Amino acid sequence: MPAWLDTHLVSVLNGLAIGFLLFILAVGLSLVFGMMDVLNLAHGVLFLTGGYMAWAIAGEHPSWLGFAGALAAAAVVGSLAGVGLSLATERLARRSHLDQALLTLGLALIAADALSVMFGDDVHAVGPPPGLDGSVSILGSAYPVYRLAIIAVGAALAAAVHRIVERTALGALVRATVADRQMVSAVGIDDRRVRVAVFGIGSLLAAVAGALGAPIYGVRPGLDATVLVLALVVVVIGGLGSVRGALVGALVIGQIETLGRSLLSDLASFVLFGALALVLVVRPHGLFGDPSGTRS
Amino acid sequence: MTDAGMTDAAMTEPGKGAALSCAGLSREFGAVRAVDGVDLTLPAGARHALIGPNGAGKSTIFRLLAGGLRPGAGRIWLDGADITRSSEARRARLGIGQTFQHSSLFLSMSAGDNIALAARRRLGRPWWPLPTSGRAERERADQLLAEVGLAGRAAAPVALLSHGERRQLELAVALASRPRVLLLDEPAAGLSPAESARLAALVGELPADVALLFVEHDLDLVFRLATRVTVMHLGRVLVSGTPAEVRGSAEVQAAYLGTGAREDLFTGGAT
Amino acid sequence: MIGRPGSAATTAAVAAAVAAAVVLALAAAPLVLAPYAVTVLTRILVFALLAMSLDLLVGITGLPSLGHGAYFGAGAYAAGWVTLHASPSGPVALLVALTAGGLVAAAAGCVAVRARGIFFLMLTLAIGEIVQQLAESWHEVTGGSNGLYGIPAARVGGAALVGDQAVHWWVLAVAATAAAGLWLLASSPFGHALRGIRDNEARMRALGYRVYGYKLAAFVVAGAVAGLAGGLLSAQQRLVTPAELGLGTSIPALLAVTIGGAGTLWGACVGAAVVVLVRDHLGASLGGHGSLLLGAVFVAVVYLLPGGAARALSMPRRRG
């Protein structure tokens, strides 16, 4: 192995863990926007909610039951919130998409404040479940097992999402709608239930990502804005409505965030903006986006 | 120069000195050849109509000429200068004016302001950061509005104008910048007979040196206004000539195995 | 805008008279109001200038930005840094603030302005947050999460601006001048072109306008004026933190523009007053839930505003 990798293996692994986490978070945002042109600005709050579920149910030293319960709770709350958001924005579908985005923004503000009322303003830590809370020796450094688990879980989820989107009827409908929404409705398919389902599943994934990520990120007010921006950058770079794009974008951003911060610390944000700008200049619709799309 | 496989002869500007011309113009959308090797020459003062059934490529040609679409092959010249690679905005600055099939106006403004915006680009200082008296634009707007039949309506909000009035305004906006070449996309669409008559009169009063190319389905209007007619079919030019030549053309009749009556030949659905 | 000569001149005269009256009232305020109320008023003025600059971008040009705080903050930091380390002169600090806001906006705008609608919103949001993160981590220059504090009082014309009255009059003078400048720009052929871009960008291209250039210019002017407002914040608060750069500023600014009715510039001022009073005062009296109230107002405005926020933000409807 090259010497460079030895020294920075820890960062690279961290980058993978963050990357897969970001993928789980961002894929819902990308599909919802690709299908419905709705920019769900409440997506970050969904992540934060999942994190708070983890803290409330699992806590700092969770049992497996607690952790599983937290994941389940996050999934339920996330999907309910997603359905709610879908219905709320559906009412504005005839108006401009900007209205819908602003609506989700207003709801996000309310939700964030509600969370801060319910759980306080302190930073909270969440522990990994037993068995995953140790560390493992990799090339002489001790590396947290949990992060390796995240990589595994993330990859599995990515494969599952890919399978659903590429192999199932629902996935075909999603891809068709992203590619040509008017054609799909002209063919007579009522995609309303599909829209609600996609919104619900995307939000579920966001909340679960928050719960899974709690042992890494912790939970605190303001985290929703931070992850929303990361998710947006992933979606912009990867291309709207593309699962592949979300994965590639997330892994790239994951590396930039961790490797960039460990190498450049203060100026890592410049690298993020630089990457964003570079991709947009070279490929304005993202790496896997559709250039003939009607968006911009 | 950069089109491999094309001989020099094919890429020379047909009709030297024409206001607008194109040679070998082609455009594909996937497997569909919407426009296939079209040559067109528009001299100054032309009154040239483009007709044909739906899907014949008329709208695509317009977009290629105006610059909203890039050709797959072929070249376009404006007053002898090659504008194939020029942007739509640049072509407008060089003197191409166009109207759109669906009126494309500035809905939050008044009729007069719509025209002022168009006029100022070529005749004023559109980037000036301080308020001006606007008198020159106002006079031009009043003059144009009177010409198109909207006299005195400079202050009327566009949002409150009827469809026919908007079509008239659309024409006024295109004329505002004194274009040398005018591309009118179905100017009479949705107009009442009286409004069509007014449109015909207006076209008749255009400056003699303006080159006009228009797409129309209203054949009465076409044969009344045009001195040359080009019939399109499946992306290609079928026949191009005087109205009489086109009417009597065997190819045109053969292409449409209709009931024989020539008036039926061009009955197409709405575009 | 060109209308009939008589009515345009009359409207302009009335508008000018009203504006003059408002400025006079604001100038007289410190003589009648309690010091705390004066501070609030000053803060409203700063925020109103920020909202007006955003209105130029959102309401007049049709570019919905959710990251305008970045340029506000850039100006605030620049002014604060200059006052701390280089020169106590008030005008110099503001000039630097204006330039800083404009430069950062130019850099961001080159990329952002290529996008439209929601895509543009996303980009500006991401850029704004990234700039905020930069401010939080660049300790040497920005002081990190502590920000710049202990900024000395600015000096104008030889005197130091100490006390809420002096600060208020300085802020009022600068803000009123800048607002007048924005109003002139909006009423000019340049402003008319921006409105054309908002209404129908495709037609503007077909008329020969260099749309990208106009949009970028609008973005830079909006950023520069936002930076100027940031400089005023620095002069008033004498403290600049990363919070000024992020969504905490960008969202209320957009809300102010939305409430006030985008495109009118004065509407943004009204909206700014509403937002500051609701968030900082109504919110405080209701147990510190300013952002929840703001969110509720946002939701209400989106649902209830006639024609929707789209009309207020004057965005063209998508076809089909």
Image: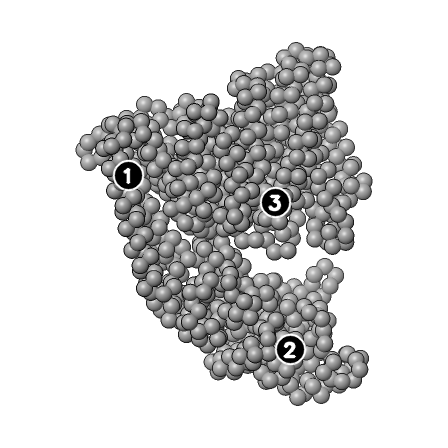
- Crowd band around label 3 with a 10 angstrom C-alpha radius: few (<14), some (14–19), many (20+): some
Placement of B61 over or under C12, stated as above or below:
below
Residue at 59% x, 16% y: name it: A125
Residue C249: image location, x then y, percent? 45, 34
Q: Quadrant of residue B263?
A: bottom right
Residue under pointer 1: C26
Q: Is residue C12 visible?
A: yes
Numbered disc 3: secondary structure: loop
Residue at 52% x, 19% y: name it: A121
Between the residue at mark 3 and the residue at mark 2, the CA separation in whole angstroms equals 40 Å
Residue at 52% x, 74% y: name it: B181
Between the residue at mark 3 and the residue at mark 1, the CA separation in whole angstroms equals 40 Å
Residue C134 left/right relative to C163: right
Q: Are marks 3 and 2 in contact (CB under 8 Å)?
A: no
Residue under pointer 3: A92
Q: Nearer the viewer, residue C23 or A140?
A: C23
Residue C25 left/right relative to B255: left
Residue under pointer 2: B218
